[in-house]
Image: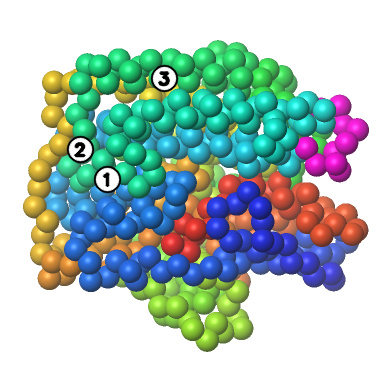
Amino acid sequence: MTKLVVGPFNRVEGDLEVRLEIAGGAVAQAHVNAPLYRGFERMLVGKDPRDALTITPRICGICSISQSAAAARALGAAMGLSPTPQGVMMAALIHAVENVSDHLTHFNLFFMPDFTRPVYAGRSWHGRALQRFTPMEGSAQRACVAARAELMHILGLMAGKWPHTLALQPGGVTRAPGPSERLRIRSVLRGFRRYLEEVVFGAPLEEFVALAGLGDLLAWRSGDAGLFFEIAETLGLAQLGQGGDRYLSFGAYPLHSDGGAPSYGFAAGIWEGEARPLDLRGLVEDPSHAWMLGEARHPAYGETRPDEMMRESAYSWCKAPRLDGRVFETGALARQVLDGHPLAHAMRGAGVLGRIGGRLLELARTQMLMERWAEAIDPAAQFMQQGKMPKEGVGVGLVEAARGALGHWLRIERGVIASYQIIAPTTWNFSPRDAQGVPGALEAALVGAPVQEGEEVPVSVQHIVRSFDPCMACTVH
């Protein structure tokens, strides 16, 4: 048995270390470590509840709007306040712009550059990968950065700034768009669609979204997505990093308001052989292998007490979320599976291919949602509902960040925050083992990954880790 420590990883938000045990030329066991403790949950205790809207977005500079959305929803629940219909739709549009930008950045700047490595020289696609995705030089990367900047003009109009906006509030959004803003948003989205269709997919989005089978997906050869699917087919990425076929989504872009029945841009639920409604009563965070003190508890009653002695039985600052004792994977593929898209179901369990394919599918489908919401903007409507912060109360804010399910659990006592617990997407996917020794989603997916003799940073491990798109800053918030 050979032991190998991989890390820190480049092109990853935050610090990440993976300890591998290798036998027979493959990973036999993996232990994933989030080595930097940050302590935002403890910072929030004793603060005015409204401070959560300022503090939690600072957890991450990539998905700050996701944190804002979760905090706003938790505060709104504690206040008994529902956003106005137009306010909740505009919040969804603002959030979707961030998630789409994240998908685009991940594909072009974080994931695809790994295929420019010299180890792949001689492959029929390597020259094209070099031309498109060489870091700092690739033509796809330049196009991505330009398109992303144009799309984010919507955030300049409606969120004031990015990251760390205060535009999302418990009762809606702070800026009501006028007719000129509505026109500008629609224009920006038309331009972004042109980029997606000409560069990323090389075809109308509707054609890609209409794909239903894995064979059809692997046969797609248009745009940069087609280059990825060609690479995936030749390298067998559907067989690399396969997961446990359990998926979780809190529901992306909740559109219910004024006390109405919940509806989502992408559905909520869990997948475990079949789709089932989301029920979080059995959710706990298990600190058995984390440098955290205390017992496994539901986040509504959770605590964050760092183990300053860093006991030897633990190996990460990340606690282990478990739902009814089981490990669930979360992310774009999970959202699309729970939303019932046939192509997503064809990609279930398809490892690296499935996770990246899921993000590309969601990129196309979210563009369609944003266009629909932009058309429905009513400048004459009310975009904000006023409310009063209670002296005592509890609230939960569940949203979907680009990387997956994000939850905020809030308790207010005597007018200040008594408890604030957060479970981020990478907390789910990069969790350590639990009390029963069951590995987290990434730890399990790494088992069986091939490792060549002499490899200090195995390319297979790189591909699997990046397919989950870790945000380690959020993980240890």
The circle drawn on residue 189 is 3
* Earlier residue among tags 2 and 1: 1
Q: Is residue 123 magenta?
A: yes
Determine whether the residue tagged by mark 1 lies in a helix, strand or loop. loop
The CA span between labels 2 and 1 is 8 Å
Q: Secondary structure at mark 3?
A: helix
Q: Nearer the viewer, residue 96 or 78?
A: 96
Per the rendering, the mark at residue 166 is: 1
Q: Could you say where residue 55 lies in the image, as x and y percent from the top left?
A: 32, 58
The residue tagged 2 is 174
User: Can I make out residue 399 in this image?
Assistant: no
- Observer-nearest of 275 and 367: 367
Q: Nearer the viewer, residue 193 or 11?
A: 11
Q: Which residues are magenta?
A: 116-125
Circles 3, 1 touching at the beta carbon (< 8 Å)? no
Sequence-wise, the earlier of marks 3 and 2 is 2
Determine the residue positioned at 57% across, 69% down: 35
Q: Are marks 2 and 1 in contact (CB under 8 Å)?
A: yes
